[in-house]
Amino acid sequence: MNTTPVLSLFAAFGLEIEYMVVDRDSLDVRPVVDRLFQDFAGHQVSDVDNGAIAWSNELAAHVLELKTNGPTADLQRAAADFHRNVELINGLLARHGAMLLPGGAHPWMDPGREMVLWPHDAHEIYDLYNTIFDCRGHGWANLQSAHLNLPFAGDDEFARLHTAIRLLLPLLPALSAASPIFDGEPTGWLDSRLDVYLHNQDRLPALTGRLIPEPVTSEAEYEARIFAPIMAAIAPFDREGIMDRYFLNARGAIARFDRGTIEIRILDTQECPLADCSIARLLIECLRSLAAGEWSGSRAQGAVDTEMLRDLFLRVIRAGGEAVVADRHYLRLLGFDERRMPVQAVWDGLFDRCAGRIDGGSRAALALILEKGCLATRILCALGGDTGRERLREVYRRLARSLATNTQFVP
């Protein structure tokens, strides 16, 4: 039975941030998260409760997830809590010559050679995923994201929140893209993580759908349109029934009716918790206005074509804020009168409207992102066209320092 307290819209939030564990000298990935947990707990565990922040494993043994230990209404405090845990973890990892590295993907990891699946609790799920999809690729082995969880109570709140999230999703990577490099070279996409994520489950397309969720407005409709096809698709491969529908749903935002939340999953991990939490604050305030009908009605928002949203999303993960929104109706739903606008200008306008509801520290962090560009843009600027291994190490060491000091990366 679900005993999670029911929270209404925007009452509190959950944030999960994934980090890479790398060698302190070479910055190559190090699959030692299990040793970290053993050092902290004194025995082998898969989860750590450290007060305000919890730690958990992921599919790959070099990836660590930190998350708010329950809902919080104060993301500014959460940023400080995340940073304190980063400091503690880096101290423990130093025993193994390792440390945490932020960003959406490792810039030169060879997933075919370096991927190590988590070998402990729940490994049966990861083993089955590997059997079905072969996880020795960037889309499984080399991607780190931040997940924002927003609450709802009942179908009406779910419908308004899901509709607002669906409308805003295509624009998010312009703020959060942080994975411009794979295999030691620029890919041409600011958000390479999302480019490969789109194709993770091509063998079973029902699991990801169009990545932009279907326009559903109730739990019953979600069950019929999303969960039922997912479970039918996995059934021939999951004879023992070990897979969970929530775990399988790979859309860009997924409903967790067991928790009464919707989880946004398309945000790349930033250079420091301050940046992750600040982006979350802006998204929350934009979604608050959309769900309240301040800029447009929920029915009109929900009528926007999924393929139009997906097309915009694909252009944004490639070009970020330089992508252009040329759909006047879509812009009107966001409160703009223009016929066409660069995505950067859209975010500038949304920030201006919402800034008064955001704390000063987050406002300053967001202003830097809007002025200097998403982290992917700043990484490419810092590289200056030189993607030799030593230059990559130099720039990504600076990212590691940003994480260690909870300060933003400025090229």
Image (cartoon, rainbow, N blue to C red):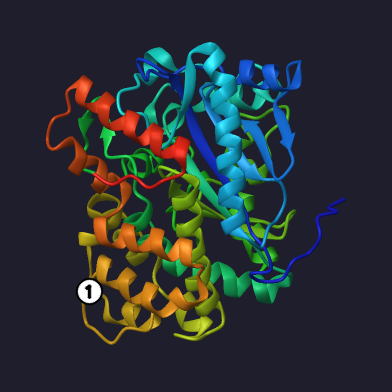
- Depth check, front residue: 326 or 88: 88
Query: Which residue is pictured at 58% across the width and 28% down the height?
Result: 89
Residue at image point 36% right, 29% down: 106
- Name the residue nearer the viewer: 290 or 13: 13
Can residue 323 be seen here? The reply is yes
Towards the viewer: 183 or 29: 29
| Image coordinates for residue 372, horizontal then vertical, percent | 25, 56
Image quarter in which the C terminus is found: top left
Residue 26 relative to residue 87: left or right? left
Circle 1 crowding by C-alpha within 10 Å: few under 14, some 14–19, many from 20: some
- Circle 1: element type: strand
* Residue 356 shown left or right of residue 394 in the figure: right
> Residue flagged by tag 1: what amino acid is it?
Met
Where is 158 relative to 128, above or below? below
Judged from this view, the residue extending furthest toward the left is 385
Q: Can residue 117 be seen in this view?
A: no
Which residue is identified by label 1? 341
Label count reads 1
x%, y% of residue 154?
A: 73, 71
Q: Residue 212's image quarter? A: bottom left
Q: Residue at x 61, y 36 (%)?
A: 85
Q: Where does residue 311 sit, x and y in percent of width and height?
A: 30, 60
Task: Give the answer, above or below, for where 22 lies relative to 206.
Answer: above
Place of residue 68 in the rendered image (x, y in percent of width and height, measured from the top left) = 65, 47
